[in-house]
Image: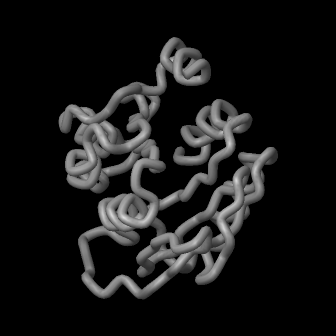
Amino acid sequence: YTLRTLFPYTTLFRSLPITIVLVQHIASAAFTTFVDRVSDAAKAWKVEPATDGMRIEKGTIIVLPQDTNISVSKGHLELSPYTVQPNINPSINSAIRTLFKSTPGRLGVVILTGMGDDGSAAIKELQGRAISVMAQDAESCAARSMPESARETGAVKFTNTRSEERRVGKE
């Protein structure tokens, strides 16, 4: 489901000079297969697993592995072990917080289908300071609690309905 919901965003954002960091709750055993599936679904993008020291390049989707914290320094990723074990891993809240600290004022967030409220606390903290916060529409979610929880924070500016996708593409 995530790949089908990610595809409209990759199409929408293809012409923008951005990097997408994809944080997906997925077991380590399925990680390589997931990266391959993202690559197949987003052909116009370079898709790579996150590695320490990796240079951030526009037009790239970087997929964060389990048990990993991420930050950015001088245009390169810095990865470290995630030592606090949340119920879900990797932690979207942690990724959003650390990426925002290392790229202040340049972070946009899209919350896609998922269970629980991961991501909501971080976007609430960043409300008004992120470039944009989007959430998947409930009707297209396999599991809608993450996007709904994100919307409940008041920080979400857009939900990916077709009319809003056209509007975001013009901004």
> Residue, x 21% and y 32% (percent of image)?
154
Can residue 89 be seen here? The reply is yes
Question: Horizontal and vertical percent for residue 55?
Answer: 68, 71
Is 170 situated above or below 99? above
User: Which quarter shows the C terminus?
Assistant: top right
Q: Looking at the image, which is closer to me, 43 or 75?
A: 75
Find residue 29 and report its horizontal and vertical position in percent: 56, 79
- Between 139 and 53, the one nearer to me in the picture: 53
> In terms of image quadrants, where is residue 129?
top left
Is residue 112 in sight in this rendering? Answer: no
Q: Which residue is more in the foreground, 85 or 107?
A: 107
Q: How many marks?
A: 0
Write the residue at 21% across / 45% down: 124
Q: By what rule are the colours in the image chosen? A: one colour
Is 155 positioned to the left or the right of 24 in the image? Answer: left
Residue at x 62%, y 53% (from the top left corner): 19
Asked if 134 appears above or below 46 in the picture, the reply is above
Q: Is residue 14 above or below residue 106?
A: above
Q: Residue at x 47, y 26 (%)?
A: 160
The residue at the far top in this view is 163
The image position of residue 42, as x and y in percent, is 73, 46
Query: In which image quadrant can residue 44 be found?
Result: top right
Q: Is residue 145 left or right of residue 7?
A: left
Q: Residue furthest right?
A: 43
Q: Where does the image place residue 98, in percent across and percent down from the top left?
A: 37, 67
Quarter-wise, where is residue 93 in the image? bottom left
**Residue 103, above or below 128:** below
